[in-house]
Image (cartoon, rainbow, N blue to C red):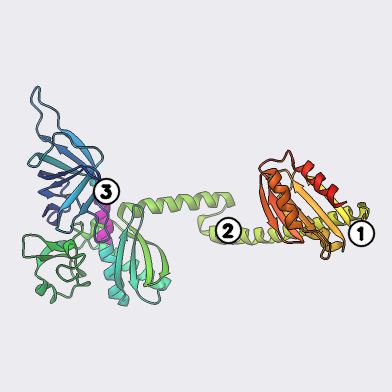
Amino acid sequence: MTDRLYYRDSFLYDFDAEIHEVAENPRPALILDRSAFYPTSGGQVHDTGLIHVGAASVRPASGASLPQTLKVTEVAETEDGRIVHYLDAPIKDAKPGTRVRGQIDATRRRDHMQQHSGQHVLSAAFVRLFHMRTVSFHMADDYCSIDLDTPTLTKDQIEAAERLSNEIILENRSVEIRFVTREEAGKLGLRKIPPAMGAPGFAGVAKPGRGNELRIIDIRDFDLSACGGTHVNQTGQIGCILLRKAEKVRQGWRVEFVAGQRAVATARRDFTTLTEAAAMFSAHIYDVPQLTSKALDEIRALGKQAEQSKEELAAAQAATMLAETPEANRHKLIVHTFADRDLNAIKLLAQKLTRLAPNAVALLATTSPQPSLVFAQSPGQPYDMGSLMKEVVAKLGGRGGGTKDMAQGGAPKADAIESALAAIASSLR
């Protein structure tokens, strides 16, 4: 079992250790006798950093080989309590007993401390204000979330929990780590009771070598929780908490948030986005929602006008084409290839042609932007447009099909479409 140094000091970024086990399959990894690297568990993601194999803390003597520096890309824990450090490269000249020096990515660690401690404060705020219990916590690279056990959650409740959380941060309350037995923990009024000993998740809060005592994170006079994660020493080190989004999920409500430097970076990105949007409207950022809503209404209105115009244009063009087409063999055969219509446009035209005349047969195609074909006939005409379409697109190397009265298809190239239409038209005359 690995001695977890972060249990006692979350601000420990450098440490000396000894290799306990070397692994190469399925990927290079080291197991040390002690480690300050945090493994993914309890909703918190793992640390990254470096491991210097050999006398990394001492300048090598003349002629001695330089120590190997390996990047720690992932950290995980085994069921028996060992911490596995996965590396970016194979390990050279390392064996059990070799001394190493670990170096945590301090920026990443501080971010994780801010997010995780922020989650404790936020979860406690929802309990204190509204008796909403947190049932799960997730930390991603750019946001965090908690799932609340509640059927409803209002905007006012979200803002109240955010406000109380930031008040606790501003008060700079102490955050202490202590270890208690499970019996003692049951009398402390913990916000969340950890799993029973031996159950999944228990290792994340138990301290090895101390009779399986529970590790308690104590935010003075505000929250007590059993937790194995890394945390700040004072709530002021969290910086701030910004709630970003709330959505209904199967087990309640999910609230997304960011804390500390993430909150600052997110607020800066939001402000920049709003400023750029406001500049487009030549307005203040606070007017952007109203102006955006107005613009969307105008776009929808213009869209309806455009659709109406397309309908009217297609009807007029269909009437003209029918008037210019003489009747032969009891039907009017319209054959036309367009160079600048999409599939929807020629399909609409085909529909107008077959509705305006009881004996219309339309063989339409477009060569741009995507070579496409539409065959249609007025109800009661004797042909099978679906079969004709399959016949044509098969020769063109495309795909298509449809019903007896309407079919559509596509071709990879446009150069043979006109000749294919001419051949079909000849067979129908």
User: Does 359 lie within the magenta span?
Assistant: no
Q: Position of residue 315 (x, y in %)?
A: 83, 58
368 sits left or right of 52 in the view:
right
Quadrant of the rendered image containing residue 416: top right
The residue drawn where x is 51% and y is 55% is: 285
Q: Position of residue 85 (x, y in %)?
A: 20, 47
Q: Is residue 250 above or below residue 21?
A: below
The answer for how far apart the CA atoms under marks 2 and 1 are is 55 Å
Specify the farthest residue to the top: 63
Which residues are the magenta region? 107-118
143 sits left or right of 94 in the view:
right
Q: Secondary structure at mark 1?
A: loop
Q: Secondary structure at mark 2?
A: helix
Residue depth check, mark 3 versus mark 2: number of the one nearer the observer: 3
Residue flagged by tag 2: what amino acid is it? Thr
> Circle 1 sits on which residue?
330
Mark 3 or mark 1: name the one nearer the start of the chain: 3
> Circle 3 sits on which residue?
108
